[in-house]
Amino acid sequence: MALTNVYTGANGSLTLASEDTPEGQDASKVLTTYGITTVGRVTGIRIQVQTELEEFHEVGRRHAVSLHPGNIHVSGTVERAYVNGALLFLLMGRGASPSNITEPYVQPTFNMTVALNDPAAPGNSLSLELKGVKFQNWGYALPEDDVVMENLSFKALTIRVLDREAPEGGGEAVATAPDFSEDSTTA
């Protein structure tokens, strides 16, 4: 199974979340105007998943007797992002267009796919897919005669893992994942 391998970080792609929401409608207008789906490339990615575990104590005991899962928060930062003009419009929403500033305007939603590679087995790869990504803070540094650097922080709704393992003897990588279709809580 490929999840036991050591991976090196590569980069990630940023795509528009084309949903049936006000954010998705604005995104489809930008897609139509520029004729693109990928609006940026991200590197230096840090992803954090925080689970609020609740401890329950019994009277007379010093240690917790159980831990119960709470809310899950997905967030992170991006150190460098290649940004094209479409992304700049989407970061600010309708507020980036000087001719169409009608309040309130929606904040765009993105999907971020982070690619991880296995240097020992080139056919194996792992992808982290973050859905419902919204950028919280955006910093832009424009040094003289140097590379433009960006720093973004974000929050996401969900994260999932796509594990692809190359079959013996070569061929197309096959995605593997555990099957959680049976409800184990009712047994």
Image (tube, rainbow, N blue to C red):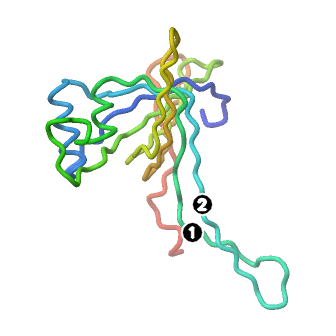
Q: Which residue is mark 1?
A: 70
In the rendered view, would you say 179 is above or below 32?
A: below
Residue 19: % across, % down: 24, 47
Residue 7: % across, % down: 63, 28
- Quarter of the rendering occupied by the N terminus: top right
Snapshot quadrant of residue 29: top left
Give the residue at x 66% y 30%.
5
In the rendered view, would you say 37 is above or below 90?
A: above
Q: Are the residues tagged 2 and 1 within 8 Å (C-beta)?
A: yes
On residue 166, which mark appears? none
Q: Residues within 10 Å of mark 1 (few under 14, many from 20)?
A: few
Residue 170: % across, % down: 51, 17
What whole-number distance in Å separates the C-alpha atoms at marks 2 and 1? 6 Å
Q: Residue furthest top?
A: 145
In the rendered view, would you say 184 is above or below 111?
A: below
Residue 23: % across, % down: 25, 47
- Quarter of the rendering occupied by the C terminus: bottom right
Q: Amino acid at mark 1?
A: Gly
In the picture, measured across the screen, residue 62 lies left or right of residue 57, that is right
Secondary structure at badge 1 equals loop
Q: Nearer the viewer, residue 15 or 115?
A: 15
Q: Which residue is mark 2?
A: 51
Q: Nearer the viewer, residue 32 or 168?
A: 32
Marks 2 and 1, the one that precedes in the sequence: 2
Q: Nearer the viewer, residue 74 or 128?
A: 74
Q: Residue furthest bottom?
A: 59
Snapshot quadrant of residue 99: top left
Q: How many marks?
A: 2
Give the residue at x 22% y 42%.
94
